[in-house]
Amino acid sequence: LEQPYWLSVARVLYRKGDRTTADQALERAILVFPLSFVGRWQAGNLLLEGGRIDEAVTQFSCILSYYPEQSSRVYDLFLRVVRDPNWILQKLVPSDAACLTQYLSYVYGTGDAESAEKVWAKRKSLGYKPSRQETIAHIDYLLSQGKIQGAHQIWKERLQEEGIPLPSDGNLITNGSFETDQILGGGFDWRVNQVQGATVSYDTAEASEGKRSLRIDFDGKENVDYYHVYQYVSLR
């Protein structure tokens, strides 16, 4: 009833070429302690060494479900083995929101924007509703990777979900007259960065259109090269 012994027996038998008996030993190893990280990790690697990738998936998917803190190790391993992020998404990552969110975070770190879009879409297809913060983080990631159209589509979908009207009459600027402090607080909204020597506020006494305008006060103590209010615009 000690898992390490069964794993050792399986390893020796695989090396001797006795696959049938080795499989039985590996099965016993998992039965002794089904949720052991070490057991699943070693069993999965033994199967990978034998070129049995599809069978190894069961072992590593268990790790992804029960040991999320170890997920990066699993994804790093499979990127070396299969070298196909789409295969990992379709066959390795469990189809639940928690695991897909976990994989999305990993994909962000790899800089693979195309895979990030696929993971986002698959999670949505399962009925997962991301928070506003998650949505903005995803939009900003896509913007950083030059995926402007994909980012803007998600932005429009989020506005519709929250009942926020889209700009009309061909206007591509969001909240152009600063009538609202923030629309979603990121993405294609205004971005206001704090800088020493300048203070940003809203002025209701002066307005080009609507009821107020943006006001920037300089204290005169700093030589400010000011570019700290800006917005990304998706041009057609």
Image (cartoon, rainbow, N blue to C red):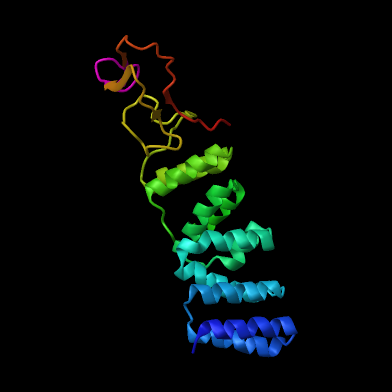
- Say if 13 sits above or below 131 in the image: below
204 with respect to 48 (left or right)? left
Q: Quadrant of residue 160?
A: top left
Comparing 127 with 90, the one in front is 90
Q: Quadrant of residue 148?
A: top right
- Name the residue at the right extreme: 17
Could you say where residue 197 lies in the image, as x and y percent from the top left? 33, 16
Comparing 213 with 167, the one in front is 213
User: Measuring 39% from the left and 46% from the top, which residue is drawn there?
Assistant: 133
Image quarter hosting the C terminus: top right
- Say if 135 sits above or below 32 in the image: above
Could you say where residue 144 lies in the image, as x and y percent from the top left? 54, 38
Comparing 39 with 88, the one in front is 39
Could you say where residue 110 lies in the image, as x and y percent from the top left? 58, 49
Q: Is residue 71 magenta?
A: no
Magenta stretch prevailing secondary structure = loop
Q: Which residues are magenta?
A: 203-216
User: Measuring 54% from the left and 70% from the top, which residue is drawn there?
Assistant: 61
- Name the residue at the top extreme: 220
Q: Is residue 204 magenta?
A: yes
Q: Is residue 196 visible?
A: yes
97 with respect to 90 (left or right)? left
State the count of labels.
Answer: 0
User: Measuring 34% from the left and 26% from the top, which residue is drawn there?
Assistant: 178
User: Measuring 67% from the left and 83% from the top, which residue is drawn there?
Assistant: 12
Q: Is residue 126 visible?
A: no
- Say if 119 sits above or below 44 in the image: above
